[in-house]
Amino acid sequence: MAYFFSEPSRTFSEYLLVPGYSSAECIPANVSLKTPVVKYRRGEEPALTMNVPMVSAVMQAVSGEQMGIALAKEGGIAFIYVSQPIEQQAEMVRRVKNYKAGFVISDSNLRLGDTLADVLALKERTGHSTMAVTDDGTGTGKLLGLVTSRDYRVSRMDPATPVSEFMTPAEKIVSAPEGTSLKAANDIIWDHKLNALPIVSAGGHLVSFVFRKDYDSHKGNPLELLDSQKRYVVGAGINSRDYEERVPALVEAGADVLVIDSSEGYSEWQKRTLAWIRSRYGDTVKVGAGNVVDGEGFRFLADCGADFVKVGIGGGSICITRETKGIGRGQATAVIDVAAERDRYFAETGVYVPICADGGIVQDYHITLALAMGADFCMLGRYFSRFDESPTSKVLIGGSYMKEYWGEGSARARNWQRYDLGGAAKLSFEEGVDSYVPYAGKLSDGMATTLSKVRSTMCNCGALTIPELREKAKLTLVSSVSIVEGGAHDVLLKDTTNSGNQRS
Ligand code: IMP
């Protein structure tokens, strides 16, 4: 007979934290959000930790190289999306690893044949006014010229004018050779009154830009996540199909941690993938697995050798898995159940396997709830897709700026490997939608607000660390009526953009 769980499955919004005693030391400045990413034995240190409990989703609309750099700067990890050719994904990883603060890889590039109309469209999409003209239209092609807003006048020029007619050609550009220090680059910028200095290889290929404003505003990032060679830490998604080619390419590119990206992880496919990685690399390659939503699924993946386990089916904002297939579980219940199994597993084996709450984080406080319920860190898609650093277009809709955000299971992403149960060349139905999310500016600003809320709530619970929060948290279910009471109510709001009930 079928098994019935005795409790309904619940989501984060059905819970609140009840404050505990806060001592005088319990202030946000004293809170540490450090958390393990990969498994470790009792008494040992994990091989990889993060300084904030947030990772970005393995999605085309979320995690490219810009996200990798920006999130590592803030202390978290981006998982570069897997639904792209292996070499392209490895190149993104390489770019994060090779990134040097102040040296920006150009993401607004043109070819000689492009027109003023293309320049304007690119500016609208990226918001950048300095564009490189390269032979192949990439940020590392041979540098042929530069276009800035000083080079054209929209009101006087035909939109069909080719860039070759108004760009500053390469021979007139002040540039610096590869290997120039940031200090020397800054001196050149000042001496020549430049806004941007291209760094060019011996063969004439663009390497990066140094911008005047970046140098001015460059300040320390106290939480930034660096490897032993002081390079940013970055993750990458893999699938259970082409791992024999993809994993070596990503490892060679310098990925610090991998994760099997799948909508449903309690499967022989994940077992085979993990076994292959362990047989080839032992424990040197770190790899998470998932997704699961109960203790049984967690134990299976932990026994298969996963370094961490991802929790969540059907809770993602763009996800329609529950509607289309009828599988899933309320995300709060899934996290609570898996966390309990993780603790039992630790007690039995002495091995602590961190868990990641993936999907369904809508309010900032949901992160705190997930941590209180036992998650070691959270994976977010929608949240990160709203920032400048996500790879998608910024578009103006009805007077407001939006960013595009689509699911990996949508026809747009065509990431069928994520849903493939073997045999099928492609999936015959979608599990995700294509959507817009409100544009939210710079990632560093957004995360600063979110994490200050997390720290503040932890203090209300008397906790200065994530393990302490888990130990001290008192959670209460809320009735549907008290949810209404939780928002602004029975008043006429003057400014609806500041209702306190805004989604982050
Ligand atoms: P969000 O943070 O609520 O937007 O959820 C992001 C998570 O949704 C990802 O990390 C994935 O686990 C999951 N996801 C991504 N694309 C799809 C899809 O097309 N269908 C279902 N789930 C998806």
Image (spheres, helix red, strand yellow):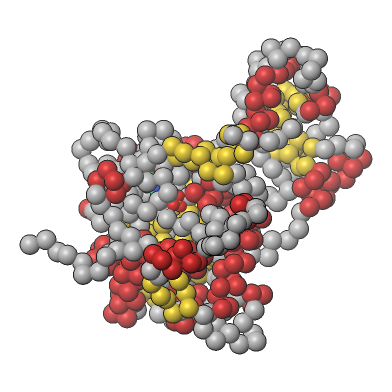
**Residue 238 appears in view:** no
Quarter of the image for the C terminus: give it: bottom right
Q: Quadrant of residue 360?
A: bottom left
Left or right, residue 496 beside residue 326? right
Above or below, 445 against 150 in this view is: below
Left or right, residue 469 beside residue 395? left
The spot of residue 4 in percent (x, y) is 17, 65
Depth check, front residue: 62 or 439: 439
**Residue 62 appears in view:** yes
Q: Quadrant of residue 280?
A: bottom left
Query: Residue at the location (33% across, 52% down)?
Result: 314
Left or right, residue 9 beside residue 317? left
Query: Residue at the location (63% across, 35% down)?
Result: 399
The spot of residue 418 in percent (x, y) is 33, 44
Query: Residue at the location (40% across, 70% down)?
Result: 478
The spot of residue 33 in percent (x, y) is 56, 70
Left or right, residue 194 beside residue 321? right
Depth check, front residue: 154 or 85: 154
Depth check, front residue: 495 or 209: 495
Quarter of the image for the N terminus: give it: bottom left
Above or below, 294 against 62 in this view is: below
Q: Quadrant of residue 409?
A: top left
The spot of residue 442 in percent (x, y) is 65, 49
Query: Residue at the location (41% across, 45% down)?
Result: 318
